[in-house]
Amino acid sequence: MDFLQFRKIFEKEPKYRFGQAQKALFQDLILNWQEAIALPLPLREELDKNCPIEISAEIHASKDEKTIKALVNLEDGLAIETVLMRHKDKRNTVCVSSQVGCAMNCSFCATGKLGFKRNLEIWEILEQVLFFARYLKEFGEKITNIVFMGMGEPFLNYENVMGAVKILNDKDGFNLGARHISISTSGIIEGIEKLAEEGLQVNLAISLHAPDDELRSELMPVNKIYSIAKILNAANDYIKKTNRRVMFEYIMIDNVNDSEEQAKELAKLMSRSLYFVNLITYNLTGIFKPSSNSKIKKFKEILEKGGVVVTQRFGFGQDIEGACGQLAAKK
């Protein structure tokens, strides 16, 4: 759907009509505009003609059915992947893509191997959430959390990502609390600075994955532009302006970044107020192997001993290539 066209149609309508349409679309989860009975029939027909809301997607479920991956077909023939994670505590988290492909070329990520195709439009971001909201409705459930951790670098599509976030948060949109929305960046400092000025209580996550610049540059070429020191300075400024925590993501890769010495180096960087580290098991995408459970446990213990707040993310959807770093829009 062309979101600009959608807004334009309502320019000639009473102001309250746009709110009615958004509520029908994002909260009532209509499948076509004829179901939006609060709107006049001529308006519904115009919307059906110019702003269709059908979503073309193929779904793949993990064996335990805790993870559902959707391959969403875009109007220009390209495709993206989005993932629903169903937690034991009844949370339902949608992992959203912000670009087709990615320009970051991180060595541990399948998306980076695709190269960058284009940014997603606001509607193309929203329809990923809408698809799974409709899916969960069949089970009497709702989306509780959204993470911008799918394909692409969100801060290189800043305006469209924030446009989508504001609709997700809007009481006439999805009406999801900002604290239930997280945005992950590889360290695009300009995006971190902009987010600090937005006045939104969304969560910021920064992909770190190494305790020193030499290794981080090998794993993440973006580090040659945005070094660890620059990222930490930006994170500190963000905290000063927002008083919100910053999560630093750290993928555990066997014999690459998981030594005890590297844990001690990381602890020196991370042992400050409102920082916390999220350790992530590496999901197979190529040349690397995941760290053993014993190594991850020891790494975590060293960080905690160094005064670092640490959490550990457990994998979802590896068997359908729907886990962190595995999204590659395969048909």
Image (cartoon, helix red, strand yellow):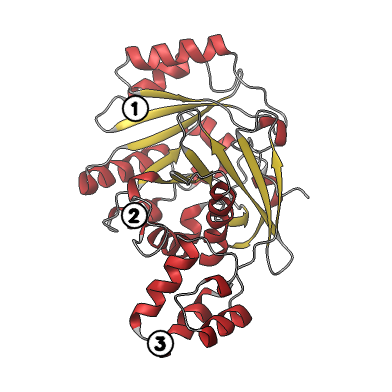
- The amino acid sitting under disc 2 is Leu
In the rendered image, the vertical position of residue 198 relative to residue 274, given as above or below? below
The residue sitting at the right extreme is: 331
Report the residue marked by disc 2.
Answer: 195
Q: Alpha-carbon neighbours of circle 1 within 10 Å: few (<14), some, or many (≥20)? A: many
Q: Residues within 10 Å of mark 2 (few under 14, many from 20)?
A: many
Residues 241 and 203: in front is: 203
**Picture quarter with the N terminus:** bottom right
Identify the residue under disc 1: 270
Residue topped by disc 3: 13
Residue at 39%, 79% in the rendered image: 17
Q: Earlier in the sequence, mark 3 or mark 1?
A: 3
Reply above or below: 63 against 59.
above
Q: Give the class, few, some or many, for how many residues have Cα within 10 Å of label 3's Cα (few <14, many ≥20).
A: few
| Apparent side of residue 244 relative to residue 92 in the rendered image (left or right) | left
Amino acid type assigned to the residue bearing label 3 in the image = Glu
Q: Secondary structure at mark 2?
A: helix
Q: How many marks?
A: 3
- Outermost residue toward the bottom? 12
Name the residue: 58% across, 35% down: 219
Residue sitting nearer the eye, 298 or 262: 298
Marks 2 and 3, how far apart in space? 33 Å
Q: In whole angstroms, how far apart are the C-alphas of marks 1 and 2?
A: 21 Å
